[in-house]
């Protein structure tokens, strides 16, 4: 598995810092990969005595040559090593003169003679991007994907006189995701882990520990180099095979077909997991049924009736377009440039000329790629233009979409004028007529401003707890989806408009988002009711209402985040000024629970966004729908793409990847204590990312005999049964003074019997269903344990006999300190009552604090001195006096001990998503 390999590499790279044994190395090869291997080997103490690479192309040196020449390492650029199959003596002599002990071939396109391969003391090692003996030959990565292999990887082997047949020194493997391309597989694993693997292999040789494992011929295969002319797509096969063929050639050399008599190359293939979207038919040569040009791309069909989606098309003249725009590709009309725009065009022409040094003059018809530019030149072009045109949002893909200079200038001008606006958001809603309204629910991953299926096409059912019926299928995200979301969030933070936005403008967008949430509050509350079981009236007031308040509160904070000036000791005659700055952290991950799906999202993300960060958020697997509806509203509010990403899926996969991801700088989590501990460990091991945790609770509520008993009963009921008991600060244990215990219990039972259990959309319902089946079963087990241990069940304890996951409101008394009910949180509608002796304030305090949790607590008494005494000694992040559940957006919320650390809400929450930088100036 990928994570296993990553962990292995991490252990290797951190444990091995200073090598005792060093080698003299000759590097034979080329490319950025060769450059990185060269740099890492030198960094780890080995001496590179010579670099042998390819000659300059169009006046530009290979990256490996550039790095070596900069370091003063001897560089040789032989066009060839052999003539008519025989080694060139002068070339071989030049090689032997450097005295290498080992040849390292990280990526080499030349044929190296065997008298060079065998010359060094330790011979030669070669990197090959497949798990040998499979896919020997020069197009190994392509064939890994074309064959639909489930695993990819690389081998480092000892060179011999065969073709990729030498003994194996080291191998690493990773899973192949369903929509991987050559590029994604290379960038995600083969490039970074291959560099580490080469460094490790050299050190094993230096230490005398390198194995030589003969290659088995079982499973061996050899495939030739894939060239453009033999990459035509055959549609007479299943959809997955077509998809594998296309992605196996993406981007080089490119799988192609014939449309309207011309060759068209297909890029960006993905399997369609759900229903086929509607579109305009397109006849394609060799297909049994027409393709469909849809709003998301070109749909193609296999012989098995299944479908795939292609996102980009490239024509014979090199021009690339989004497949969705096939029928409108030629409709663009040239715009006339203003004088200022002509100056910009002149600057861009100079940038083109600087890159295309072999072109005498950049004409209107000059094609970027046909003039010799490569992928690295695309990055340079984009970055140079962004420097010249401040605020221009230019992407690498734009260069591929407009390869001719005149087309490129038109594209840039339209972007500068704001004419190249984002396309209207396309949402494949699940539509239900319910609660006297039409509810429209997104159900796909939300990544980089778009709703899209999970990379692997997987889905799962989200269930209505009222009757157990399936509401809809929701995308089941993969590790690849998390990586794409993090990349989008990182780009949005570092290069997008969000990172450079005026704080006041950021606040304006959050205010607008709050307004849109208010405009859609009935729809959001309805979705919350059917997806989580929340009673509609409570969802409207609390789940949704407090979410709106939270965004408005933090919108007001955006332009009020300030540092301080600090007087420091002056070293005369110098004068110094020291001040602090509050800065956003970057990409933040947020993992929210299922009890308040929208409200927990708001509590964390509003502060995070106000601080200027970007977000990758995982809703609870069983309650994803309000988070996805929220994502839709963020687009309407004008939040830039990539700032907010919503990834539904499992905690073990999505949440774990968030914890491990090296580009995430903060993770905020609300959930159970065991999972919180695991997350904290993963965050520490990965990149020491900042963590805030709101975890389990067993909140004590102490009720003294001098209280307002009517209020204590009413508030005590709410402290337990609010939101069906699925409430993080629910009173997990009520301590009632002995003299009023029986009367308190009598009144509670009277009130419990009045509670109406039923459909959460019924406005008269008091108590809806538990969130999901597994939780209800856990509550029933909790009650059984209580009865077995001797606690007195005075009411409830059973499942309600009706469809859905309904649990009777339950009351236990005579609960002693050693019992399971006294120690463990139920997270459900179960009141746990214990007596304490009259007047024993310190005794009940000791019992209340005898827990590893410390989220909330409460006390009811008319004696203000007693109330303050108790509040000072209760070990909890929140203390309620003569009230309960009274949270407010301006008041910090968070626990002590194993209930976690860090705060939601209030000014304190902002600091969870900020870092402090100290600056000292001498003047």
Image: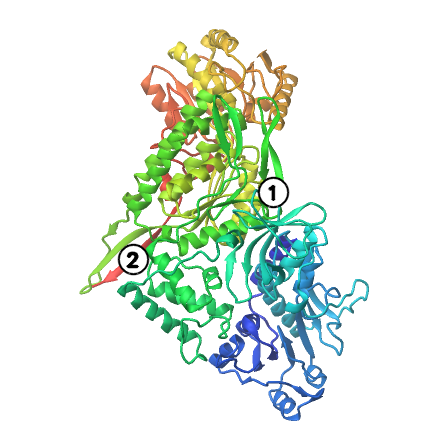
Element class at badge 2: strand
In front here: 64 or 407? Answer: 407
Please tell me whether residue 715 is drawn above or below residue 101 in the rendered image. Answer: above
**Residue 919: assigned label:** 2
Answer with the quarter of the image where residue 787 lies. top right
Would you call the spot at circle 2 few (<14 residues within 10 Å), some (14-19), or many (20 or more)? few
Please tell me whether residue 56 is drawn above or below residue 684 in the rendered image. Answer: below
The residue carrying mark 1 is 276
Q: How is the image coloured?
A: rainbow
Would you call the spot at circle 1 few (<14 residues within 10 Å), some (14-19), or many (20 or more)? some
Element class at badge 1: loop
In front here: 643 or 228? Answer: 228
Q: Where is residue 141 in the image (x, y as percent from the top left)?
A: 66, 63
At a point 45% along the width and 9% down the height, the residue shown is 740
Residue furthest bottom as drawn: 90
Q: How many marks?
A: 2
């Amino acid at each position: 598995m990928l994570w296993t390999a990553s962990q292995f590499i991490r252990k290797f790279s951190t444990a091995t810092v200073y090598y005792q044994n060093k080698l003299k190395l000759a590097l034979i090869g080329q490319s950025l990969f060769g450059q990185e291997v060269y740099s890492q080997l030198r960094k780890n103490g080995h001496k590179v005595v010579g670099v042998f690479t390819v000659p300059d192309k169009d006046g530009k040196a290979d990256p490996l040559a550039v790095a070596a020449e900069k370091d003063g390492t001897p560089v040789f650029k032989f066009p060839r090593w052999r003539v008519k199959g025989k080694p060139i003596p002068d070339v071989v002599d030049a090689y032997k003169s450097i005295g290498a002990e080992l040849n390292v071939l990280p990526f080499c396109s030349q044929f190296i003679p065997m008298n060079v391969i065998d010359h060094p003391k330790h011979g030669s090692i070669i990197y090959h991007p497949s798990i040998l003996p499979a896919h020997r030959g020069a197009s190994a990565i392509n064939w890994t994907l074309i064959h639909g292999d489930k695993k990819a990887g690389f081998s480092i082997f000892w060179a011999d006189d065969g073709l990729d047949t030498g003994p194996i020194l080291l191998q690493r493997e990773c899973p192949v995701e369903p929509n991987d391309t050559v590029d994604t597989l290379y960038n995600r694993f083969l490039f970074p882990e291959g560099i580490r693997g080469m460094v490790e292999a050299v050190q094993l040789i230096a230490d005398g520990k390198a194995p030589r494992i003969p290659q088995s011929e079982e499973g061996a295969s050899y495939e030739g180099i894939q060239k453009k002319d033999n990459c035509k797509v055959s549609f007479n096969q299943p959809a997955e095979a077509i998809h594998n063929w296309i992605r196996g050639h993406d981007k080089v050399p490119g799988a192609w077909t014939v449309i309207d008599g011309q060759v068209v190359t297909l890029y960006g293939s993905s399997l369609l997991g759900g229903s086929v979207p509607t579109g305009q038919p397109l006849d394609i040569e060799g297909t049994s049924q027409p393709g469909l040009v849809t709003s998301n791309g070109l749909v193609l069909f296999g012989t098995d009736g299944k479908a795939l989606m292609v996102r980009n098309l490239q024509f014979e003249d090199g021009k690339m377009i989004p497949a969705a725009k096939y029928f409108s590709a030629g409709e663009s009309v040239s715009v006339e440039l203003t004088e200022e725009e002509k100056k910009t065009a002149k600057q861009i022409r100079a940038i083109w000329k600087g890159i295309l040094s072999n072109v005498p003059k950049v004409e209107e018809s000059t094609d970027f790629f046909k003039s010799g530019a490569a992928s690295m030149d695309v990055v340079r072009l984009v970055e140079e233009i962004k420097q010249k045109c401040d605020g221009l949002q230019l992407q690498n893909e734009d260069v591929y979409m407009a390869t001719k200079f005149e087309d490129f200038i038109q594209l840039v001008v339209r972007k500068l004028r704001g004419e190249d606006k984002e396309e209207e958001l396309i949402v494949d809603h699940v539509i239900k007529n319910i609660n006297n309204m039409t509810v429209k629910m997104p159900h796909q991953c939300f990544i980089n401003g778009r709703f899209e299926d999970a990379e692997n096409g997987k889905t799962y059912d989200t269930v209505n707890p009222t009757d157990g019926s399936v509401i809809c299928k929701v995308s089941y995200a993969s590790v690849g989806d998390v990586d794409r979301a993090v990349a989008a969030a990182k780009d949005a933070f570092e290069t997008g408009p969000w990172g450079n936005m005026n704080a006041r403008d950021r606040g304006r967008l959050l205010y607008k988002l709050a307004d849109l949430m208010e405009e859609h509050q009935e729809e959001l509350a309805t979705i919350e009711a059917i997806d989580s079981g929340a009673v509609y009236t409570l969802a409207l007031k609390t789940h949704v209402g407090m979410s709106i308040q939270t965004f408005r509160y933090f919108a007001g904070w955006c332009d009020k985040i300030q540092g301080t000036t600090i007087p420091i000791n002056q070293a005369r005659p110098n004068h110094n000024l020291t001040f602090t700055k509050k800065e956003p952290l970057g990409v933040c991950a947020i993992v929210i629970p299922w009890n308040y799906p929208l409200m927990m999202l708001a509590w964390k993300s509003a502060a995070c966004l106000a601080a200027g960060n970007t977000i990758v958020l995982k809703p609870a697997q069983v309650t994803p729908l309000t988070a996805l509806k929220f994502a839709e509203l963020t687009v309407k509010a004008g939040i830039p793409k990539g700032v907010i990403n919503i990834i539904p899926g499992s905690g073990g996969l999505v949440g774990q990847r968030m914890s491990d991801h090296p580009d995430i700088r903060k993770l905020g989590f609300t959930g159970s204590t065991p999972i919180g501990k695991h997350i904290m460990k993963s965050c520490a091991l990965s990149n020491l990312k900042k963590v805030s945790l709101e975890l389990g609770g067993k909140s004590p509520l102490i009720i003294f005999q001098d209280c307002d008993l009517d209020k204590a009963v009413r508030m005590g009921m709410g402290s337990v049964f609010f939101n069906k008991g699925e409430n993080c600060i629910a009173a997990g244990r009520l301590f009632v003074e002995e003299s009023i215990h029986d009367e308190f219990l009598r009144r509670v039972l009277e009130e419990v019997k009045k509670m109406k259990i039923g459909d959460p959309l019924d406005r008269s319902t008091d108590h809806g269903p538990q969130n999901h089946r597994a939780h209800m079963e856990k509550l029933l087990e909790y009650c059984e344990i209580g009865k077995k241990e001797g606690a007195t069940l005075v009411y409830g304890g059973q499942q309600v006999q009706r469809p859905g996951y309904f649990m009777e409101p339950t009351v236990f008394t005579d609960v002693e300190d050693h019992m399971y009910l006294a120690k463990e949180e139920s997270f459900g509608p179960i009141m746990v009552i214990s007596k304490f002796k009259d007047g024993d304030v310190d005794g009940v305090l000791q019992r209340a604090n005898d827990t590893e949790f410390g989220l909330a607590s409460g006390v009811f008494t008319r004696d203000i001195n007693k109330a303050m005494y108790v509040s000072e000694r209760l070990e909890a992040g929140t203390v309620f006096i003569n009230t309960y559940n009274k949270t407010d957006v301006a008041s910090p919320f968070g626990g002590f001990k194993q209930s976690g650390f860090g705060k939601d809400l209030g000014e304190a929450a902002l600091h969870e998503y900020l870092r402090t930088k100290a600056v000292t100036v001498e003047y």
